[in-house]
Amino acid sequence: MHYGSFPVILVTYGQFTFMTSNAMLNSEQR
C-alpha cells in the first residue's frame, strides 16, 4: 500500500461516515 493512497482512503471513509450518520439523523427526525 503506497503512502499516497492513504489520504484518499481516509477522505473516502470520512465522507462515507458523514453520509451514513447524516442519513441516520434525518430518519430519526421524521
Image: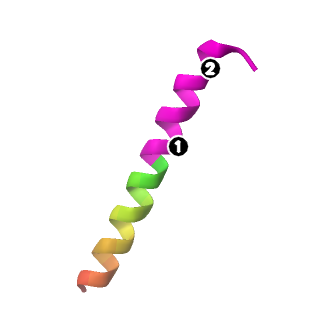
Give x and y (percent) for residue 26. 29, 73
Under circle 2, the secondary element is helix
Q: Which mark is residue 13?
A: 1
Question: SS at mark 1?
Answer: helix
| 26 in relation to 7, above or below | below
Q: Is residue 29 above or below residue 7?
A: below
- Please identify the quarter of the rendering in which residue 21 is found: bottom left
Residue 20 rendering spot, x and y as whole percentages: 44, 61
Residue at image coords 54%, 26%: 8
Q: Nearer the viewer, residue 3 or 26?
A: 3
Main structural element of the magenta stretch: helix, strand or loop?
Answer: helix
Q: Is residue 1 above or below residue 27?
A: above
Colour theme:
rainbow
| Badge 1 amino acid | Tyr
Left/right placement of residue 3 relative to residue 12 reads: right
Label 2 amino acid? Ser
Residue at mark 1 to residue at mark 2: CA–CA distance: 12 Å
Hey, which quadrant is residue 1 in on the image?
top right
Q: Earlier in the sequence, mark 1 or mark 2?
A: 2
Residue at 58% from the left image edge and 32% from the top image edge: 9
Q: Are marks 1 and 2 in contact (CB under 8 Å)?
A: no
For label 1, the crowd category at 10 Å Cα-Cα, with few meaning under 14, some 14 to 19 and many 20 or more, is few
Magenta-highlighted residues: 1-15
Q: Which residue is depicted at the point 64% across and 15% down?
A: 3
Q: Which mark is residue 23?
A: none
User: Is residue 12 part of the magenta span, yes or no?
Assistant: yes
Task: Read off the residue under disc 2.
Answer: 5
